[in-house]
Image (tube, rainbow, N blue to C red):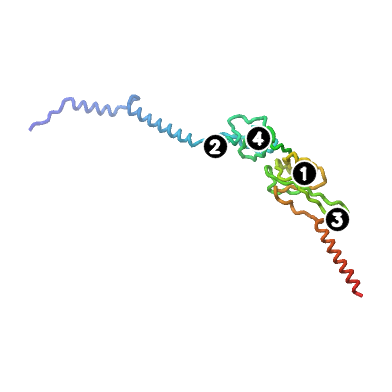
Amino acid sequence: MTSEKQHPDAAPRSAAEAADRLRRPSWKDPRLIVGVLLVVVSMAGVVALVGSQDRTAPVYAADRTISVGEPVSAEDLRVVDVRLDDVSGQYLSADREPPADLQFVSVVEEGELVPARAVDAVDPLGRQAVTLEIEDTLARAVEPGRAVDLWATTPGAIGEDAGARVDQVVAGAEVSAVTESSSTFGAQSAVTVELLVAPDDLPEVLAARSSAAALSLVPAGAAPAAADHEGESAPDGESTEGEDADEDEGGEEEAP
């Protein structure tokens, strides 16, 4: 029986291969380079994916409620990043300083994004701001940015049978500001409302403000609040009393 002869270099060669496997890989090891490249490629892919989905743009938002006619100022605005996609051009971009030579031509509520159409050099409709003192309690819908109708109630002359006269002064005027104040003793309170009035309606509004008429504001399209219109019911009442008097007189004549 013959025994196999072992090659004299077999043992040393196996030891050398084991040492190569246990040796720490160097920067020149192809496997390490491929692993690093795979990590870099995967990170770049994640960054590109997140960047493609995050299409936010910086725009200005109102830091407080801004009325019509106020100049555009960075102190009244704050920058927010929002995703607007194709409508980003419809809002005031924060990529540059807000234009100081423009003013607000419409009311912008606190926290609302500033529309590009809300700022301009002048009001495109040519409206004028008029302040009115309103003694009646305003409806909840009468607030900045809403359209309202202005009504004037003129009391009847003393000694005459005609009652109060109610006329609509202007329709669809925009409210730009509302300020409430009270008297020194707190017994009476008045509300100052700033309206944006068209040039054609301005003379009637100023005339109503300077007259003795009581001014009331109601939401646009609504009828004024029901008031004490005694003059409208007086004629019916008078005719009724006359008929009753005639009947009484007739009764007295027929008694004998």
The disc placed on residue 119 is 4
Instruction: Work out which residue is located at the far bottom of the displayed protein and give it.
Output: 256
The disc placed on residue 86 is 2
**Is residue 227 at all visible to an observer of this figure?**
yes
The numbered mark, 1 or 3, whose residue comes first in the sequence reads: 1
Could you give the CA–CA distance between mark 2 and mark 3, rounded to whole angstroms?
65 Å
Q: Which residue is mark 3?
A: 161
The numbered mark, 4 or 1, whose residue comes first in the sequence reads: 4
The numbered mark, 4 or 2, whose residue comes first in the sequence reads: 2
Could you give the CA–CA distance between mark 1 and mark 2, rounded to whole angstroms?
44 Å
User: In which quadrant will I find the N terminus?
Assistant: top left
Amino acid type at mark 4? Val
Amino acid type at mark 2? Asp
In what element is the residue under mark 4? strand
Amino acid type at mark 3? Asp
Residue 86 shown left or right of residue 221 in the figure: left
In what element is the residue under mark 2? helix
Given residues 190 and 56, the one toward you in this image is: 56
Amino acid type at mark 1? Glu
Mark toward the viewer: 4 or 2: 2
Q: Are marks 2 and 3 in contact (CB under 8 Å)?
A: no
Residue 198 shown left or right of residue 242 in the figure: left
Could you give the CA–CA distance between mark 3 and mark 4, rounded to whole angstroms?
52 Å
Q: Which residue is mark 1?
A: 133
